Amino acid sequence: MSEPLGLFGGTFDPVHYGHLRLAEEAIAHLALGGVRWIPAGQPPHRGPPRVTARQRLEMVRRATTGNPRFSVDAGEVEAAAPSYTVHTLERLRAELGDQQSLVLLVGADAFAGLATWHRWRDIFALAHVAVSHRPGFPVETASLPHELATEFNNRRLTDSGALRLSPAGGIVTFAMTQLAISATQIRKLLANGLSARYLLPDGVLDYIQLHSLYRST
Ligand code: ATP
């Protein structure tokens, strides 16, 4: 079986170094062949993003360019309908075949909300899930809703090497460099005219400035 492929969805409003380190460290810790970044078009779980889907896609392109293990998938941005992860995984499964190991990458905060996602249980038939630690969000069953905690206990793989042995169905956790960076914090800084430099790549910040994004809260 070929190397597992990481899939990293998010609003990326804007993309920052927390996202980039998550993807980079996932490749190393989970022995992924690469990571496909999938900016959400219309995220169903939250209010509308502050900038357009095209602008968020462009920022992800700028942030990931130059890393041959990263690729960007515009499928959700181009879709007219809301971005449900399960639909994206079905599309990728059809594209990549039944045998490819797929690993959905999520931060601990996103994982804690998984049981509210559309057809969430079907996700495990389509991909593995890898949960990264994030400051302030413990990854432990006590902090998860009951039905998700049950899936977590039943599906947990202690050895990430097992990700390459099956195409889907397991849950792993991995520790990444803890960076308490959030897109919310960056939007607030920019809206207040403060510097967000070194929280996100210069190329993304240049794009934000060029298009006068995030000027108000
Ligand atoms: P916002 O502050 O607008 O909610 P965010 O910074 O959490 O945004 P998202 O685009 O919502 O960014 O996150 C995409 C994915 O990246 C999620 O799975 C989230 O858990 C993860 N993530 C975001 N920031 C970090 C971080 N600093 N460390 C680890 N994971 C992160």
Image (cartoon, grey):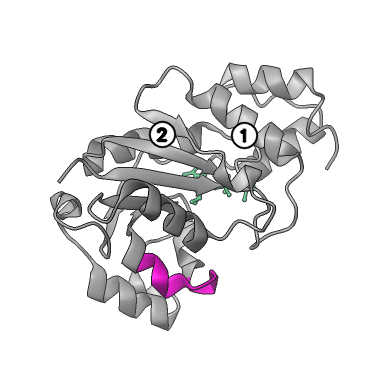
**Mark 2 CB near ligand 1 (8 Å cut):** yes
Q: Which residues are magenta?
A: 115-124
Residue occupying the far bottom of the picture: 146
Q: How many numbered discs?
A: 2
- Numbered tag placed on residue 67 in the rendering: none
Left or right of 13 in this view: 145: left
Instruction: Give the percent coordinates (x, y) of residue 51.
Output: 76, 39
Query: Would you place residue 8 above or below residue 157 in this image?
Result: above
Front-most of 18 and 72?
72
**Viewer-proximal residue among 96 and 103:** 96
| Residue 180 visible in the snapshot | no
Residue that numbered label 1 is attached to: 57
- Residue corresponding to mark 2: 21
Q: Residues within 10 Å of mark 1 (few under 14, many from 20)?
A: many
* Crowd band around label 2 with a 10 angstrom C-alpha radius: few (<14), some (14–19), many (20+): some
The answer, for residue 190, to whether it is visible in the render is: yes
Where residue 20 appears, as percent x and y from the top left, is: 45, 33
Principal secondary structure, stretch drawn in magenta: helix
- Where is residue 86 drawn, in percent x and y? 48, 63
Residue 66: image quadrant is top left
